[in-house]
């Protein structure tokens, strides 16, 4: 593969994957105001229901759309239109059956599921979310079909539409129910119904798009002989199940962890149910912020897979190794300062975005900021292993990390003096273990071993200085602006404005310092920048050679 082709391949994949960034940022836009509308307790109900939904959704849609896309692509390449049509029909029926099972369980047994999670007041939220599973499953079938036809437009538009409707409907319902004085459980259910509404609109768009743009597939008298439905189903499952298993590990672990944390807070640490819900709610708020750095690394993780896979398949192992090292270095350069920033500015961030939340919030975010860096490295090392044909190793590392997380949380959350702080410590330990194991697997399986010093040392120097700068600027500027605002307005508003202005100044200063340090320490090279859309132009602006 020539350099130009390689870059075009990466740019196309990265631009497509950049939609993930939009989804995650809109997700934060959705959850931050909801966290304030619902409060700590209400947000706990919301997240318990969402974690249950996420497990059903992952099992139903993580691997099968990928398998469907591949099968449609192969049939399309062979000109087998009848085969592509039958494959879609079989997949759509399969997805609907799986979705109906998940929706039925959540619809009929919301109380039992809520009680199982040690959070009985989340039952209404589970009920409100139940229709979303079958709707998203059906939408996933259409998305897999379009992707197999090399048409990414409907997938992207439907995802944006889904998130937009979710944000508008969820926030509007939560606000209206809050204004009318409804119970916290009903307000949470209204907020999470936005997910169902978004899925409904996305499915409607995909269905209409299929009928309009692929009318010939519906009306043509196709004479080519397709494979039998049983054979198609077996192929779909054979490809999709291993991917589903790997993707489901962390979703299942997160669900177990939710149950464990709430159980231990109430039965070991001695908190009343309301207090335990409030602690889990503020932990969920910190989780929303800690997931943001991964949004900027996920597109890179997606984009390097085809390039590494192509190099490995073409026996250009050195080229594949260089791409893997560059992707790791870029991930470290992006994720490390963001993690440090979340940690050192945890106090103003939580008080600006979630004013009035439980006082544990900043301490939770400080630990989770560190964990967010390891999450990003785990994402990219998983991608490197999967691209090299070593799909089983990420499953092993995720399982080991999840076991560590459960064990650490079980012991630490039960300690009254530690309580909810044990949860992010468990998350940090989980991803550290995953990263260590992934690097061991990469070193064992790669012809060209990545240089850990090149990947981590220079970004660490820049991030450390940036963290010191951000904290110093925040402390100095809050000492000035905090007094100024407090003197002019009522105390609560003055404190908030002081936090917000000082935090903004600290972030601006940190970004400037880090950009300078990245260039001066040569943490990133021109070859690295070529892996990013418009990277060469950006490299020219930053004088990276």
Image (cartoon, rainbow, N blue to C red):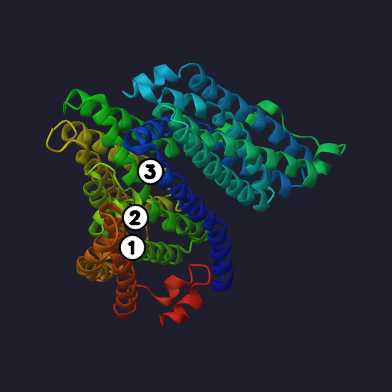
The answer for how far apart the CA atoms under marks 3 and 1 are is 32 Å
Q: Residue at x 32, y 37 (%)?
A: 40
Residue 58 makes an appearance in the image: no
Q: Position of residue 180 (x, y in %)?
A: 47, 31
Q: In this rendering, is residue 214 above or below 45?
A: below
The Cα atoms of the two marked residues, 1 and 2, are separated by: 7 Å
Which of the numbered marks, if any, corresponds to residue 311?
none
Helix, strand or loop at mark 2:
helix
Query: Separation of disc 3 and disc 2 at Cα?
Result: 31 Å
In the image, residue 71 sits, relative to residue 302, either above or below, namely above
Q: Which residue is mark 3?
A: 36
Residue pointed to by mark 2:
377
User: How packed is label 2: few (under 14 Cα within 10 Å), some, or many (20 or more)?
Assistant: many
Q: Is residue 90 left or right of residue 371?
A: right
- First in residue order: circle 3 vs circle 2: 3
The image quadrant where one finds the C terminus is bottom left
Name the residue beneath numbered marker 1.
332
Task: Identify the residue at the far right of this view.
Answer: 221
Label 3 sits on a secondary structure element that is: helix
Say if 500 sits above or below 47 in the image: below
Mark 1 and mark 2 in contact? Answer it, CB < 8 Å. yes
Query: In this figure, what is the number of numbered marks?
Result: 3
Residue at (22% x, 25% y) in the render: 272
The front one of 352 and 301 is 352
Sequence-first tag of 1 and 2: 1
Nearer the viewer's eye, disc 3 or disc 1?
Answer: 3
Which comes sooner in the sequence, label 3 or label 1?
Answer: 3
- Is the residue marked by circle 3 packed among few (<14), some (14-19), or many (20+) residues within 10 Å? some
Secondary structure, mark 1, is helix
Number of other residues with Cα within 10 Å of mark 1, as a class: few under 14, some 14 to 19, many 20 or more? many
């Amino acid at each position: 593969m020539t350099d130009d082709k390689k870059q075009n391949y990466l740019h196309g994949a990265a631009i497509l994957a950049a939609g993930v960034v939009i989804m995650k940022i809109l997700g934060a836009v959705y959850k931050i105001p909801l966290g304030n509308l619902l409060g700590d307790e209400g947000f706990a109900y919301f997240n318990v229901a969402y974690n249950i939904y996420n497990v059903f959704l992952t099992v139903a849609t993580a691997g099968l759309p990928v398998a469907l896309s591949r099968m449609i692509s192969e049939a399309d390449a062979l000109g087998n239109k009848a085969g592509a049509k039958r494959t879609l029909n079989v997949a759509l029926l399969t997805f609907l059956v799986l979705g109906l099972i998940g929706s039925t369980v959540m619809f009929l047994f919301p109380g039992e599921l809520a009680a199982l999670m040690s959070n009985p007041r989340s039952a209404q939220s589970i009920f409100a979310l139940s229709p979303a599973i079958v709707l998203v499953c059906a939408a996933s079938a259409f998305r897999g079909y379009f992707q197999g036809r090399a048409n990414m437009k409907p997938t992207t538009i439907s995802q944006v539409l889904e998130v937009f409707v979710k944000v508008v409907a969820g926030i509007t319902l939560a606000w209206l129910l809050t204004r009318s004085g409804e119970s916290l459980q009903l307000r949470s259910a209204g907020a999470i119904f936005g997910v169902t509404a978004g899925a409904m609109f996305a499915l409607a768009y995909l269905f209409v798009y299929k009928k309009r743009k692929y009318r010939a597939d519906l009306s043509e008298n196709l004479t080519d002989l397709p494979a039998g439905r049983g054979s198609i189903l077996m192929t779909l499952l054979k490809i999709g199940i291993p991917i589903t298993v790997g993707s489901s590990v962390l979703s299942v672990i997160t669900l177990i962890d939710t149950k464990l944390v709430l159980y231990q807070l109430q039965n070991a640490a001695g908190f009343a149910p309301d207090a335990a819900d409030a602690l889990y709610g503020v932990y969920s708020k910190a989780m929303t912020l800690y997931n943001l750095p991964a949004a900027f690394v996920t597109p890179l993780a997606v984009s390097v897979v085809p390039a590494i896979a192509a190099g490995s398949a073409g026996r250009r192992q050195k080229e594949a190794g260089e791409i893997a090292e560059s992707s790791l270095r870029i991930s470290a350069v992006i994720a490390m300062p963001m993690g440090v920033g979340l940690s050192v500015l945890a106090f103003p961030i939580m008080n600006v975005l979630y004013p009035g939340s439980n006082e544990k919030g900043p301490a939770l975010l400080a630990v989770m900021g560190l964990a967010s860096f390891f999450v990003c490295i785990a994402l990219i090392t998983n991608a490197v292993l999967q691209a090299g044909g070593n799909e089983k190793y990420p499953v092993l590392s995720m399982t080991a990390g999840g076991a560590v997380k459960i064990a650490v949380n079980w012991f630490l959350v039960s300690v009254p003096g530690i309580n909810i702080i044990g949860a992010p410590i468990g998350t940090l330990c989980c991803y550290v273990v995953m990263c260590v194991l992934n690097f061991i697997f990469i070193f064992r399986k790669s012809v060209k071993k990545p240089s850990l010093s090149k990947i981590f040392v220079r970004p660490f120097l820049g991030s450390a200085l940036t963290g010191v700068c951000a904290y110093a600027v925040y402390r100095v500027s809050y000492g000035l602006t905090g007094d100024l605002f407090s003197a002019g307005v009522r105390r609560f508003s003055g404190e908030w404005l002081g936090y917000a202005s000082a935090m903004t100044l600290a972030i601006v200063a940190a970004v400037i310092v880090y950009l300078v340090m990245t260039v001066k320490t040569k943490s990133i090279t021109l070859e690295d920048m070529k892996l990013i859309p418009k990277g060469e132009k950006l490299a020219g602006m930053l004088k990276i050679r």
